[in-house]
Image (cartoon, rainbow, N blue to C red):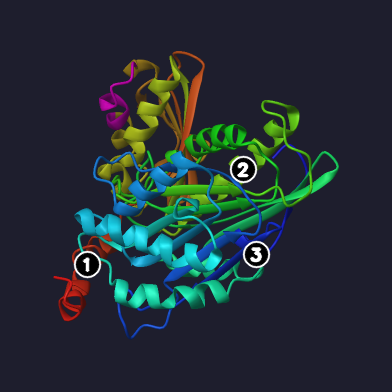
Amino acid sequence: MDFPFTRIKGGVGAPQGFLTSAVSCGIKNPEASRPDLALIYSEKPCASAGTFTTNRVKAAPVRVSQSHLRKGELRAIVANSGNANACTGVQGIEDANAMCDAVAVPLRLKRSQIGVSSTGVIGLPMPMTRITPRADELVSKLGPKNGPDVAAAIMTSDTRPKEVAISFDLGEHRVRIGGCVKGAGMISPSMATMLCFITTDANLPGECLRKSVLECVEESFNRITIDGDMSTNDTVMVLANGASGMPPIRRNGKRCRQFREALRWVMLELAKAVVRDGERVTKFVTVNVAGARTYLDAKKVAEAVCKSALVKSSWNGGDPNWGRIIHAVGYSRARIREELVDIHIGGKAACLGGLQAATPMNELRAIVAENEFEIDIQLNQGDASYTMYSSDLSPEYIDFNRSEYAYWKQARKDGLV
């Protein structure tokens, strides 16, 4: 960021006026003790905003949360892991509403003031008999220091919790932004497969917050990919309660722009954390495209390269195969000229003017052998640019995703299928 800030502890629970909690329901496995149900609650009324999957197959909690955001401002978010509550029909909507009601009643809120999110196996009914009885405990455990518990409770194939929080000055007031994210597989832009919850004690009018969220999501979560798959449950929800005591931020003013820059930084940190924790990922790769005729052309090239299974496989093998990169550039449907394309790997030329550069191959291999590196693609046709963050594709990824259906055995025991 262009102004000073301090990283702080607490994740999504770090901003003032927010309380969080998590409990174990055994949603996926009744014998498991890890937390799988989480709650975020603001003690004060909030402005709220959200973005959701663009997949036409949308999970029940996505539909319910979208509806609640249209009706007004959220005060709380309830979320679970272990079951996506997706492709569950009318019963899924009823279950998502029941999750909202279960926390709304003890919190003395309306159902429409609750956002709901789920992640996990698609196609199975929610085991509500294990969820609703834990709602009172979930509410009773609310506290100001439980943000890390929320990050842990929403994990599925993640190997570690992912959270970040910062404090910074907006005028004469110190404000905070905190957030957590889950996501490791089925990651693709618009939006990436993930749940992300962000809170802030800044005082933002709803319209300012909604515009900021849309812009920052486009510059962060919509710029990552692991395996090119888009989920049914992708959700980003942001709550702003003004508990810092600052006056309302004026729309499009200097403080609004500063807040947006801070929010973008938080979202981008969380987005990068998703890629680094991708399912069986060994490489984190930044792909910079420049010199495109238009922003859309630059985006097309970046997405084609970052989603290419051939390119990603070569990264996994430590192979600086620029030929695979330029072939993805060529089929991206962007307006390019082969003889103008330059490709640099880790700052060293691999391709100049569409031809093999003089850099020794062993130097390029040494770069691609690293855990993190950058690829710069210069189209030399204009001023537009675009950056994406991607990963390799490993044999272990395939092994990991060959079967997900052990949960169906438990579902049969529960009488859900």
Residue range corresponding to the magenta coloring: 327-335
Quadrant occupied by the N terminus:
top right
Near-viewer residue (128 or 261): 128
Give amino acid for label 2: Leu
Q: Residue at the spot x=67%, y=28% of the render?
A: 251
Determine the image quadrant of residue 18.
bottom right
Q: Position of residue 134 (x, y in %)?
A: 43, 77
Which residue, given by chain and number where applicable, does mark 1 sit on? Answer: 404
Disc 1 on helix, strand or loop?
loop
Give amino acid for label 3: Gly
Q: Is residue 84 above or below residue 290?
A: below
Per the rendering, the mark at residue 263 is 2
Which residue, given by chain and number where applicable, does mark 3 sit on? Answer: 10
Give amino acid for label 1: Glu
Residue 157 showing in the rendered view? no
Q: Position of residue 5 (x, y in %)?
A: 75, 48
* Mark toward the start of the polypeptide (2 vs 1): 2
Disc 2 on helix, strand or loop?
helix
Disc 3 on helix, strand or loop?
loop
Q: Residue furthest right?
A: 172
